[in-house]
Amino acid sequence: MVNIKNLSQFKKKWEPKIIEELQNQLKDLIPNSIRGPMDKVFKYSEGQLAIVLGDTLKEGAQVVEKRLEEIAAKHKFKAKDMSIELPLRFREVTYPVDGQTDEELIKNVQDISS
């Protein structure tokens, strides 16, 4: 899971349309960092994307996380002809280590949204 860090503060500075545009830019970057045929990325909620890496162990997920952090840090996010810093927070969970069900896995990543 990847989300905009301190989303409530970020929302005070930027309107929802801008946040969605930045989130879409981030979403477009991610497929370059995930490579498996079962890997997917989708919008989970406002300011939050879920990345599903099929057949990937925790160590592999951590490698992808690191790669995404580096790519996002170098990328120039833009909205309204302005360059905007997009502070991100990442959290990986794996089945079955971090949860046996979808609900358990989702619960274990919810703490990053604040």
Image: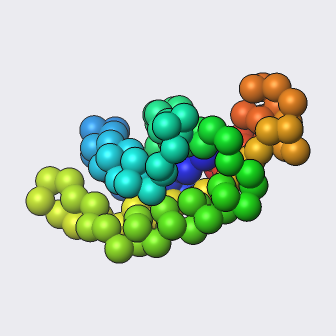
Q: Is residue 8 above or below residue 67?
A: above
Image spot of residue 23 (x, y percent): 37, 45
Image spot of residue 111 (x, y percent): 73, 47
Q: Residue furthest left?
A: 81
On the question of residue 8 being in view, the answer is no
On the question of residue 55 being in view, the answer is yes
Q: Which color scheme does this rendered protein use?
A: rainbow
Image spot of residue 112 (x, y percent): 67, 51
- Apparent side of residue 92 relative to residue 33 in the rendered image (left or right): right
- Residue beneath the point at 57% across and 68% down: 66
- Residue beneath the point at 22% across and 59% down: 78
Residue 103 occupies quadrant: top right
- Apparent side of residue 104 relative to residue 69 in the rendered image (left or right): right
- Apparent side of residue 39 relative to residue 56 in the rendered image (left or right): left
Q: Is residue 111 above or below residue 73?
A: above
- Residue beneath the point at 26% across and 67% down: 76
- Residue beneath the point at 54% across and 35% down: 38
- Apparent side of residue 95 relative to residue 2 in the rendered image (left or right): right
Q: Nearer the viewer, residue 32 or 21?
A: 32
How many labels were placed on the picture?
0
Q: Nearer the viewer, residue 48 or 16?
A: 48
Image spot of residue 102 (x, y percent): 75, 26
Q: In this view, does 10 lie above or below 85?
A: above
